[in-house]
Amino acid sequence: MVKFEAQVLSCTKGKKGFDLTLDQTAFYPEGGGQPYDTGLLEVAGTCDGVQVLEVHSRDGQVVHTCGQPLEPGTTVTGVIDWDRRFDLMQQHSGEHIVSGMAHTLWGCENVGFHLGTEVVTIDFDRPLTQEQCAHLEEDVNQYIWTDIPVEISVPSPEELSRLNYRSKKELAGPVRIVEFPGADCCACCGTHVTSAGQVGLVKLLSVQPFRTGVRIELVCGGRAFRYLSRALNQNVQVSHLLSAKPFETAGAVAKLLTKNEALQARVTTLEDAHFARLAGQYAGPGDVILFDDDLSPDSLRRLCSAVLHACGGSNFCACFSGDDPSGYKYAIGQLDGDLRSFVKELNQALSGRGGGKPDFVQGSVQASRQEINAFFQAAIREGTAP
């Protein structure tokens, strides 16, 4: 149902807008892991309407949080945001099929379900391997493509006692049973597709250990289509950049990483030679403050260590790499020293952050080269330098 007629029973100011109750509604209130519907309440005989922002069940009533108030007694046409509703139906129905088939195959109990804005998560109470999840995904999609109609019923207590259905808790009163024949039978009050084929596709995105079992992320229907389209587009771009065929991009990336590791090793060797020559210029006692261009944090650490050991004694070495006005990374060391109070002052004075061991620290400052030099000159002059 996309549209329905109703009458406003009450309207009060709420925390997020105006809370309305109707004499009847087809808006789904949030619950059971499924988000609420949104849409419009159109006022009969006018072009006006108010946005339905949220829908919740409170004290046995369905409360519609709206952007504007409506007078009690007003006749309205409720218009559900069908794109949102159908998306939620696809995700919820896909979760049913996945949970039911995992239960049949391996006795998994669904102990947690969340239908988010991007993905669906299911928590199972026992571990599953990647191979089992691949098997599950294939079986789920094979079932979807049979397009078996969904059966929804409210059986009598006698009929219910004979049913083998999934439920997270003991239920009293009328129980709504949603059955995907051959895949799942579950007590559920949510919204679902009318036949399995409307789910379209289920794609399991990840499986991670969670408590005693696993947490699975998945997308269904339109979300699965959009996700796979984005993934394909990314792979096509990578394919072009690497001059590799679409199904050969992983191998091309592996080769690129191997080459990069070899180049990085070569760069490290050349840097160490450069640092050794530079350190030789500062051999002997004396504090050192120096700047070098475009160094990574690791390279900056190795430069500082090389110069520090060349200086020897109790002197400190402070190395910086960066540019004005972006700021500078730093590495500061003092053999057997304690730099903690000094570095705290440096970070406060130069909008910096960082830390490390008492005798060796790394971080960054948002300051110019001139400001850095001025800070150290003042520290040396005032005797607060390490």
Image (cartoon, rainbow, N blue to C red):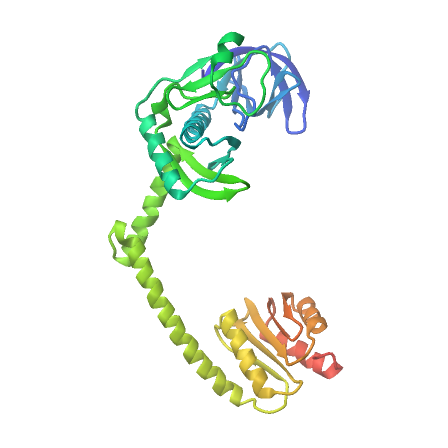
Is there any visible trace of residue 227 in the rendered image? no
What residue is drawn where x is 40% and y is 75%? 267
Is there any visible trace of residue 72 in the rendered image? yes
What residue is drawn where x is 45% and y is 42%? 207
Q: Is residue 245 above or below residue 86?
A: below
- Is residue 38 or residue 219 the one in the foreground? 219
- Residue 160 as seen in the image, left or right of residue 22: left
- Is residue 100 or residue 353 the one in the foreground? 100
What residue is drawn where x is 34% and y is 40%? 229
Quadrant position of the N terminus in the picture: top left
Q: Is residue 36 above or below residue 239?
A: above
Pinpoint residue 376: horizontal percent, then vertical percent: 66, 79
- Is residue 108 or residue 240 the one in the foreground? 108
Pinpoint residue 353: horizontal percent, then vertical percent: 63, 65
Quadrant position of the C terminus in the picture: bottom right
Count of numbered labels shown in the rendering? 0
Pinpoint residue 113: horizontal percent, then vertical percent: 52, 32
